[in-house]
Image: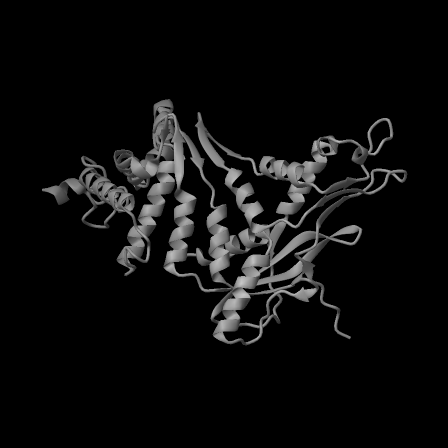
């Protein structure tokens, strides 16, 4: 079966979510400590599973993120020769971003995304329970 | 006295010379016709890049050599200095193209691809409206292979549209076996790079056609500039086009944190 990441909008959304999660400090910290952790194997498995889609999905996402940046900077869709699949792809990334922001709200103190349920901010160590109250 | 400027003759036959292994051997030679941009388009179209996750490792597969070897086999005009075990010259055989050993065809393919960016001379005329890329390449000079530098390509500054075309070409991919098999095949950006060269080139230096320098870097009228662009686009070697545009967009992509 041959697929085209540029036309698989659900795949783009899921892969973008993975990419956002993989970029969080929390994730990076957990992977760093995996060297000493008792459940190292499980964490290592998670690490390998982090980005589960073929490379082509992430290449497409980076292209779309670049497009989004250019549009924000003032370029027009005509300048960028956007087609329908580009716009659908951008919508998929926005949906992934919204889902990510629900699961990883920003710390009210320093702005770093933290997983829902974290007690302390992985960036500034602020007490997130106090902030939620 | 100023040193004599050398020009890379674009319209000459491409001759690849191989050093003899011992004093009794003659220099081996593969002679190709001039390679056009269309030839390069066909070669680039056959070059694919594949990535696949294999456990913890990411495997990257790129094979530019096979399309070049196929091209050389199909287009070779002559092969000189190659003999069979019985001492006969391969040129005497009808299937002489097949009798040239593969390592020589592979090496010839490598030479055709051997074009790299080079530092631009500090005293090269500067024009703020243009972006300069300097290249060096391996080419034949009479009976020896030489490294030629000072090959300059002057481009107009790329627009966001040009940038988007390069990025799109680099991101276009197919996946094989569904979205979870981790195998991606990229189509390559060769054709887009050649198109962008033809659109953005303003002047070139260090090349010749018909014994005269290709294009000119002096101040020109708009019509003359357009004529210059068309001439360079028509005459320039496809591999030099590809590398020059690659360097142009690498320079463009430098970003600060």
B31 lies left or right of A129:
right
Q: Is residue B112 visible?
A: yes
* Residue depicted at x 39% and y 34%: B174
Kindly give the residue lying farthest to the left in the view shown.
Answer: A133
Work out which quarter of the rendered image holds the C terminus of chain B and state it: bottom left
Q: Nearer the viewer, residue A67 or A79?
A: A79
Above-or-below relation of A44 to B208: above
Which residue is more in the foreground, A94 or B44?
Answer: B44
- Left or right of B179 in this view: B112: right
**So how many labels did they put on this image?**
0
Identify the residue at the far right of this view: B24
Residue A53 in picture, x, y percent from top left: 35, 32
Q: Is residue B99 above or below residue B72?
A: above
Q: Quadrant of residue B187?
A: top left
Query: What x and y, as percent, mark residue A115?
Result: 22, 37
- Identify the residue shown where x is 56% and y is 63%: B231
Residue B219 placement: quadrant: bottom right
Q: Is residue B79 above or below residue A111?
A: above
Where the N terminus of chain B falls, by quadrant? bottom right
Seen from the viewer's position, the closer of residues B38 and A3 is: B38
């Amino acid at each position: 079966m041959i697929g085209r990441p540029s036309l698989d909008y659900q795949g783009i959304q899921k892969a973008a979510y993975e990419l956002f999660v993989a970029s969080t400090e929390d994730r990076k910290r957990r992977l760093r400590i995996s060297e000493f952790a008792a459940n190292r194997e499980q964490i290592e498995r998670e690490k390998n599973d982090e980005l589960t889609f073929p490379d082509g999905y992430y290449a497409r996402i980076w292209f779309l993120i670049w497009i989004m940046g250019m549009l924000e900077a003032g370029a027009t869709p005509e300048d960028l020769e956007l087609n329908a699949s580009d716009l659908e792809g951008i919508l998929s990334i926005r949906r992934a971003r919204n889902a990510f922001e629900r699961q990883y709200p920003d710390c009210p103190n320093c702005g770093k995304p933290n997983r829902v349920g974290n007690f302390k901010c992985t960036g500034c160590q602020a007490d997130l329970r106090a902030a939620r109250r | 006295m100023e040193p004599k400027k050398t020009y890379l003759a674009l319209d000459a036959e491409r001759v690849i010379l191989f050093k003899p292994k011992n004093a009794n051997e003659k220099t081996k030679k593969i002679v190709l016709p001039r390679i056009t941009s269309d030839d390069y388009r066909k070669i680039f179209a056959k070059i694919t890049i594949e990535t696949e996750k294999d456990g913890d490792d990411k495997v990257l597969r790129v094979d530019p050599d096979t399309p070049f070897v196929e091209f050389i086999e199909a287009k070779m005009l002559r092969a000189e200095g190659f003999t069979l075990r019985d001492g006969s010259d391969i040129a005497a055989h009808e299937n002489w193209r097949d009798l040239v050993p593969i390592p020589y065809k592979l090496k010839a393919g490598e030479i055709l691809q051997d074009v790299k960016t080079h530092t631009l001379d500090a005293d090269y005329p500067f024009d703020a409206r243009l972006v300069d890329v300097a290249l060096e390449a391996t080419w034949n000079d009479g009976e020896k292979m030489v490294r030629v530098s000072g090959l300059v390509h002057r481009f107009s500054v790329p627009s966001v549209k040009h940038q988007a075309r390069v990025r799109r070409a680099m991101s276009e991919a197919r996946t094989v076996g569904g979205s979870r098999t981790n195998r991606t095949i990229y189509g390559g950006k060769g054709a887009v790079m050649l198109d962008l060269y033809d659109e953005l080139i303003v002047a070139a230096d260090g090349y010749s056609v018909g014994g005269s320098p290709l294009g000119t870097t002096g101040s020109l009228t708009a019509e003359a500039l357009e004529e210059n662009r068309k001439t360079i686009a028509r005459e320039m070697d496809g591999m030099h086009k590809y590398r020059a545009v690659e360097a142009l967009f690498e320079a463009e992509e430098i970003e600060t944190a």
